[in-house]
Image: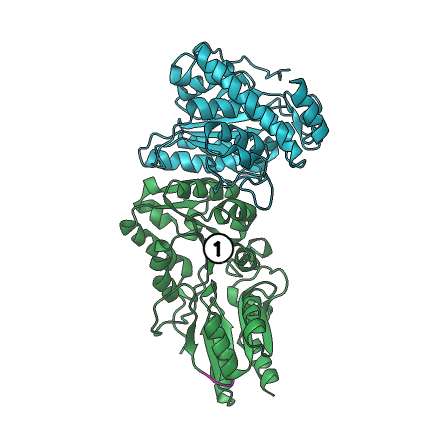
Chain colours: A green, B cyan
Amino acid sequence: MMQGNLYSMRETFGKLLAELGETEKDLIVITADVGDSTRAMYFREKFKDRYFNVGISEQDMVNFAAGLAAVGKKPAIVNFAMFLMRAWEQIRNSVARMNLDVKMFVTHAGYSDHGDGSSHQALEDIALMRVLPNMKVIVPADPKDIERSLPVIIKERGPIYYRMGRDYSPPITVGQEYDFKIGKAYVIKEGSDLVIMGAGVVLWDALKAAEELEKMGISTAVINLFSIKPIDEDTIEYYARKTGRVITIEEHSIYGGIGSAVAEVLVKRYPVPMRFIGATTFGRSARSQRDLLDYYNINYKSIIREAIDLVK
Amino acid sequence: MLVDLGFDIVPMEKGGSDGAPISIEELNKLRRVAERARKNVIKMLFYDQSIHVGSSLSSIEILTTLIFRYIRNHSNLVDKDWLILSKGHAAPALYAVLAEKGYINEDELWRIQDISGLLQGHPEIFIPGVDMSTGSLGQGLSFGIGVATGIKMSGGSGRVYVIMGDGEQDEGEVWEAMTHAVVRNLDNLIAFIEMNNFQLDGPTDEIKPKNFLPKVWEAVGWKVLNCDGHDFISISNAIDEALKAGKPAVIFANTIRGKGFPAIENTKKQRSSPDDARKSLLDA
């Protein structure tokens, strides 16, 4: 079911952003010299007067966007996840503190910049953004999820961190019927013995693992958390009650990331045994993102191993 | 005490708001406002000894000139003038001058930093008259470029004034912003850099010299001006020149940290005791 063509997160994002520029007349796109790599270039080609490359100056980029938002514009920062983190304090002290309408669309998150190695692989960004007051954190699973959510995100007021990879994007939610809503999680597979929760491209592994587990007689649900902050506490609690076992998977550090966010909810509302699958250290170079996910055991095999351990 | 800028200061002859000459009456008014604001900053020490008095007293005349002579209010965000205190630790001076202008009730000044008070240790936008929440150095100029660019895109008439310190120039983001502003051709952006020659741990000369800065800003493409940051005519002349520059302008303002407060004047000291404050106010 999941062996469709790989298609690109950034291509989908860049083209859709340029399309949205037609109707969103106040939308301004800002980048720190990565317009080509992020595909913000499609917006640049159409709306030169609403596109700013500030140069390799991430801190300046964030406060520049904050200033534009302060006078009523709709700035959208488009950058590598990793290098936007260089301006975390600017995001904290200017954007979040003044609750300004600045959107941050990041690509190259997780291991997606596989070749460049650990310096370029953002595995801490969800944790860093999630702690900020006023900040919303959104993680689409695949290009279809980008299509569902981008028009909604552009219209939403206030700071939003929107996390994408690069090209690796196995189809996960194609054929699924749901509209995107901030704060809502989506059940992409039903099940009753175990629930796998996560966001982003690793949900492909969640579905693959669920399929294998079904063959072993373990009925496995898969939840696309999509909106990491605000998080859908009700759905998380409901499936914890229903299955009694939770595995989280993320292309991010297990410390402070998606697994932690789920644990925060469950410890408060309905504690159940949990397993956390994700990064525990820096990445490295590889020829493909898939190689890295397998190398660091962030894949369906790990889920199956943990699942068998949880149900026995 | 003036900093040797290492190049000729741009001559300034014209005076007054947008070129209008500054009258004796107006000058006297500015003096009275600044004098009261200065006393009120020192008086805040009776209530809270942790405020940054030294840096605040360095900024009184610049803030007075801007708020009483230049800043135009307007309900439209792109037609109002913006005042960004990037050196946010001088907040007490900003509050004292805003109180003179009627934005803030004077009684609030004595509740500065109190849990139930309005006035925070650094500026926050929920305080009337504050256009940007600051406190972390180096961020005001980039924000100002965003505001000034937004104003230009909307065809607004607003101008943006950003006040920075000399110690603040150590921040890398200032370089990012300085080079950015020139690219945007922002003739509605005016930056002040207060040269009071001290930063938190001591004299700027010993920590990171700043005397080369005017040459750097000029080389990058800014209109570079100079003024005596405690003299209303000199400050006004510099602003009038800056407004005619046709490009982003920076005014290096020579100031004295702790100006008018003998216990800490011209030292790195930010704070002092209520006793010193009382003595200073009685002597004045």
Q: Chain of mark 1?
A: A
Q: Which residues are magenta?
A: A191-195
On the picture, is A150 further left or further right than B207? Answer: left
Dividing the image into 4 quarters, which one contains the N terminus of chain B?
Answer: top right
Q: Is A193 in the magenta?
A: yes
Question: Mark 1 sits on what residue?
Answer: A135
Q: Is A86 in the magenta?
A: no
Dividing the image into 4 quarters, which one contains the C terminus of chain B?
Answer: top right
Tell which of B166 and A208 is nearer to you. Answer: B166
Instruction: Determine whether A11 is above or below A300 in the image.
Output: above
- Residue B103: x and y in percent read 46, 33
* Residue type, label 1: Met
On the picture, is A273 further left or further right than A28? Answer: right
User: Which residue sits at x=51%, y=87%?
Assistant: A218
User: Which residue sits at x=58%, y=67%?
Assistant: A260
- Residue B18: x and y in percent read 39, 18
- Residue A89: x and y in percent read 56, 47
Instruction: Determine whether A311 is above or below B137 in the image.
Output: below
Query: Is residue B176 shown to the viewer in this render?
Result: yes
